[in-house]
Image (cartoon, rainbow, N blue to C red):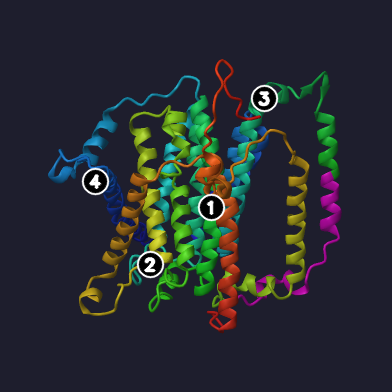
Amino acid sequence: MDSYFSILLTEVYKILFLLVPVLVSVAMIVWLDRRVWAFVQKRRGPNVVGPFGLFQSLADALKYIFKEIIIPASSNKLVFVLAPIVTMTLALISWAVIPFGEDFVLADINVGILYLFAVSSLGVYGIIMGGWASNSKYPFLGAIRSAAQMVSYEVSIGVIIINVLLCVGSLNLSDIVMAQQNLWFVIPLFPMFVIFFISALAETNRPPFDLPEAEAELVAGYQTEYSGMMYAMFWLGEYANILLMCAMGSILFLGGWFSPIDIFPFNAVPGPFWLMFKILFLFILFALVKATVPRYRYDQLMKLGWKIFLPFSLFYVVLTSSFLIYFDLLPGK
Amino acid sequence: MIAHSVFFYIFSLIAIVSAVMVTVSKNTVHSVFFLILDFISISCLFIMIGAEFLGMIMLIVYVGAVAVLFLFVVMMLNVAEQKGQWFSSRWDGGTHIPVGLLVSLIIFFELIIVIGGWKYKPDLLNSLSINISTEVTNTRSIGNVLYTDYILLFQISGMILLVAMIGAIVLTYRERAGVKRQSYVKQISRERDEGVDLIEAERNKGVKIDA
């Protein structure tokens, strides 16, 4: 019994060691997102609270905590309260399998990439539950839109992952990174990287695919009836998901914890920092896209997902596998 | 080992309770939520016996895609509002219970017939003696049999799914008149000459454009 307890304690300690930095960086990237956005549009952005406005997210969080949580009278109360919790939990549990370095991972499971994919496909439930439980038209429309959108783009993300897996021969995330020691997959699979990036935008409901919360049509989509801390949880979950997608992109295509070139000043930087740089790089790309591109129309979004991305990535699967077989490069033989 | 069995009982209890709740709960949308909970706890059970690939695929396919569409349909059809009707088990004066009992009895006997006639592989009966290699991950070992010994069955099931999909599309597809479709090629290839027209408008008559 004592050993169980000590195992439990060390695991809790490890989880805290992982989650606290993730939550802090979520707060920081909210600030970064707004700063980049403002920078592109020649505004200042949040620059008042703390140095460079760094504590803006903290101030926002305090505001959210002290605001009243309003639960609509006609809502389905249990589901209404559960929805933000589901979103937040799902956004956080996927970090368990992200490898920050060699043997520097909380749960080194065999099917890591499938786990990531499964958890991100569950993410749609937070939104559907929130939209349905609000018992109001705008949230419901937003939830339906986002369900269709996330399911559609998941398909193309799945096919893109197959492309990477063909080159690796393992579902373990550490193996995926190790396979990129000499050549990052972004080079041979560049089209897939572009499609992954765009699908990740759609999967996380970021502009230009933020139709579930298109304020001109749906007020705030599924979040319309939420207030105070519950709204903040949706928001945090969304940003944690964005960070996670960036991490997934850096692991699948940008060589995870490896430095770009294996020479002295670069390879002296520890692996986790490289992963963070890559995540930050992808996130700044996300923010730049948000600042520059106008919102898609819904039929265009569906057309892009099903008629362009899916056939193209399927074609690329055939291309990758034929290439690997022809040149006898198939891994795991 | 204790922790293992504790978790096993927790997950199986959740699975059974939520399976019961699927049929018992008054709100149809709640039923679907319980179904999802059921799927999740069953995939946890899969993971606990070491079949992590099956567990994850269960999550991705059933919870991530099938149940979402299910939820989608149930919410859109507003079946939730019919709960009174369903629960009094009356529909236009009749009652559902005899028919439901009949159907479930038929399915029960069919299951008995099928399982009774089941032929087990001899070494499955003393499955404890089977050598399970822990070297090969189960993703790889499923792939090894699925794409070699059972390739025909695998492809046939793929074909069946394809046929079902085409059937669904054919059944629901309707050609509707007056639908405006956007064609990117048409839009982009438009030149100034065909796009802009200078029309001499007659006084008091105006111009008809779409004629």
The answer to whether the residue labelled 2 contacts the one labelled 4, judged by CB atoms less than 8 Å apart, is: no
The one of A160 and A15 positioned closer to us in this rendering: A160
Q: Do pointers 2 and 4 mark residues of a single chain?
A: yes
* Mark 2 / mark 4, whichever is N-terminal: 4
Determine which residue is flagged by label 1: A154
Q: Main secondary structure of the magenta part?
A: helix
Callout 2: SS: loop
Image point (42%, 66%), residue name = A253
Amino acid type at image mark 2: Leu
Q: Residues within 10 Å of mark 2 (few under 14, many from 20)?
A: many
Highlighted magenta segment, given as a residue range? B107-133
Q: Is residue A200 magenta?
A: no
Position in image of residue B147 (x %, y %): 68, 73
* Mark 2 / mark 1, whichever is N-terminal: 1
Amino acid type at image mark 1: Glu
Position in image of residue A231 (x %, y %): 37, 34
- Tell me the distance, in whole angstroms, between the alpha carbons under discs 2 and 1: 20 Å
Callout 1: SS: helix
Between tags 1 and 3, which lies in front?
A: 1
Image point (77%, 54%), residue name = B163
- Tell me the distance, in whole angstroms, between the alpha carbons under discs 1 and 3: 33 Å
Numbered circle sitting on residue B83: 3
